[in-house]
Image: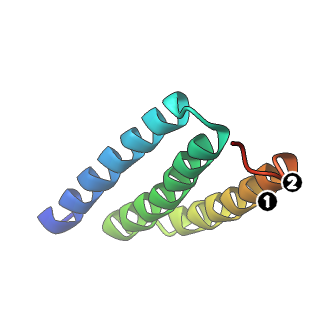
Amino acid sequence: MSIFLALILLVLAAVLVGGLVGTLRGPLAADRMIAAQVLGTAGVAFLLILGEATATHALRDVALVLAALSSVMTLAFVRLHGKPEK
């Protein structure tokens, strides 16, 4: 694995930790949902880059499933919380 890919993975890991903190500590449900979306997006990017760096093609499939689940999670949130909080 090249140093460049390792640095990108390190930055994405930091984003994942930040998203986890935001999900746990967000004051509003919408804030926690946005942090969860950051987790999904960064998780997909992390898996794709890790799969490319290690030549593990199965990680592409896992990233695709995570992206689909993240989209479904957003739709479920909007359906549950139809009107924004004030």
**Residue ID at (44%, 64%):** 45
Residue 47 is situated, as x and y percent measured from the top left of the image, at 46, 59
Rendered image: mark on residue 79: 2
| Residue 79 against residue 29 in the figure, above or below | below
Q: CA distance from mark 1 to mark 2?
A: 6 Å
Place of residue 56 in the rendered image (x, y in percent of width and height, measured from the top left):
45, 64
Kindly identify which residue carries mark 1: 75
Is 24 situated above or below 77?
above
Q: Position of residue 15 (x, y in %)?
A: 35, 49
Residue plotted at (64% across, 46% down): 30
62 vs 8, left or right, is right
Q: Is residue 7 left or right of residue 20?
A: left
From the viewer's side, name the closer residue of 8 and 56.
Answer: 8
Which dot marks residue 42? none
Q: Is residue 25 or residue 66 the one in the foreground?
A: 25
Q: Is label 1 in contact with label 2 (beta carbons under 8 Å)?
A: yes
Q: Secondary structure at mark 1?
A: helix
Q: Where the C terminus falls, by quadrant? A: top right
Task: Check disc 2 and give the amino acid type.
Answer: Arg
Mark 2 surroundings within 10 Å by alpha-carbon count, few (fewer than 14), some (14 through 19), many (20 or more): few
Pick out the residue farthest to the front: 86
Q: Residue at x 49, y 54 (%)?
A: 38
Q: Is residue 53 left or right of residue 80?
A: left
**Residue plotted at (50% across, 29% down):** 25
Quadrant housing residue 66: bottom right
Q: Residue furthest top?
A: 25
Drawn side of residue 86 relative to residue 40, left or right: right
The x and y percentages for residue 84 are 74, 50
Write down the quadrant of residue 72 in the picture.
Answer: bottom right
Amino acid type of the residue that numbered disc 1 sits on in the rendered structure: Leu
